[in-house]
Amino acid sequence: MNYRDLPSMPVAAQSTESITTGDWRTIRPVLNKDLCDRCYHCWAFCPDVSVIVEEEGSFPKVDLNHCKGCGICSTECSKQAITMVREDL
Amino acid sequence: MTDFQFPLPKEEYMYPGHSACPGCGEPISMRMLLKALGPDTIMNVPAGCCAVIPGVWPTYSLKIPLIDHAFECTGAVSSGIRAALDHFGKEDVTVVGWAGDGGTADIGLQSLSGAVDRGTDMLYIMYDNEAYMNTGNQCSSATPCGANTTTTPGGKSHQRTKKDVMKMMIANGIVYGASLNPAFPEDFMEKVVTAKGIRGPKFLHILSPCPSGWKFDPRNTIKIARLATETGVFPLYEYRNGETIFTKDLKNRKPLEEYLRLQGRFKHLSQADVEGMQRVLDESIQKLLKEE
């Protein structure tokens, strides 16, 4: 690729969804559905927009392509329903 | 709290995959802020973590327009965007200047002061991670007393108190000022919505814990942010029409030690140091409560 092929102005037009930040993860959140009362604190405090709630009332899911494994969801969970499990190497 | 569903609006204005460190406090605040402001927003950011998180070119993580510019001109660029919007008659668009504590309290102070002086209708946000974190934890004028940074090794050499930018801005003539904490989302959203409805220069101060700089486990970001308010280190207040109102109780505070002991940057402090800091904090809060 030549520099002439680049656009004349540095305008970003592609979303970061293509970057798989999930590769950074060393620990992974696992939800215990028996304990979860769907308060969605995990969703509200997720810095990586990786806790997905499809519709109100459904259990939260984790987008493992983008979750960086910080563990905020497990600390903030009001019922301690999320545990962090080490990723296999 | 089991009775509430969706503590925040459901619309997302941020894509996953941005380049913040795991457990960073800033994207939490940015996400909440954009949920409160909605899509009619233009943001401008200087150099710093805030320039990296929305995306490294050619990718971009926000669903609103953003301008990236030099470190010292957040206020000036906000004024410029506002002037262009006014020229086209787009008064309902919110202009947000999002700068770090270095870009506000040190480097961008003159352009912020100029923009407030001109009465620019903007929302200026100082997200405060208490040092220059993007370049690797150098001391800024917003670094608290006794904190260990790479330019104040051991922390003993840093005996200055944190610069009170809010007081400077109140003296400068802002119409609305507030301190925000991502650990209290309802309070956070309410203040941002209030600020959006007021015309004129507005200044918001957001606490943004930094796991790599403050040296704590990334999972404790929100816990530490909450403790900062509960111990009185970061009181939540609102300034409007010449009055300051505290939005979270300051009278029943947790001991400061709980907040300090979770962070590696205060590891060197002895028990006597912590007691001394607690005394200084109590005195300053007594003074704040009298002013109210």
Image (spheres, grey):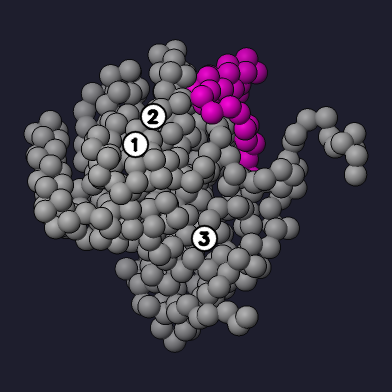
Are the residues under marks 3 and 1 on the same chain?
yes
Q: Are marks 3 and 1 in contact (CB under 8 Å)?
A: no
Q: Is residue A25 left or right of residue B175?
A: right
Of pointers 3 and 2, the one earlier in the residue sequence:
3
Are the residues under marks 2 and 1 on the same chain?
yes
Quarter in which the C terminus of chain B is drawn: top left
Q: Residues within 10 Å of mark 2 (few under 14, many from 20)?
A: many
Amino acid tagged 2: Ala
Of pointers 3 and 1, the one earlier in the residue sequence:
3
- What residue is pinned by disc 3? B22
- What residue is pinned by disc 2? B105
Query: Can the viewer see residue B206?
Result: no
Q: Are marks 3 and 2 in contact (CB under 8 Å)?
A: no
Q: Is residue A38 left or right of residue B10?
A: left
Mark 2 falls on what kind of element?
helix
Q: Residues within 10 Å of mark 3 (few under 14, many from 20)?
A: many
Mark 1 falls on what kind of element?
loop
- What residue is pinned by disc 1? B142
Mark 3 falls on what kind of element?
loop
> Marks 3 and 1, Cα distance to the nearest angstrom?
23 Å
User: Does the magenta run of residues contain B81?
Assistant: yes
Of pointers 2 and 1, the one earlier in the residue sequence:
2
Amino acid tagged 1: Ala
Q: Are marks 2 and 1 in contact (CB under 8 Å)?
A: yes
The image position of residue A49, as x and y in percent, is: 56, 59
Write down the quadrant of residue A79 in the picture: bottom left
Q: Which residue sits furthest bottom?
A: A34
Residue at 50% x, 35% y is: B98
> Marks 2 and 1, Cα distance to the nearest angstrom?
7 Å
Q: Is residue B281 left or right of residue B214?
A: left
Q: Residues within 10 Å of mark 1 (few under 14, many from 20)?
A: many
Q: Which residues are magenta?
A: B63-92
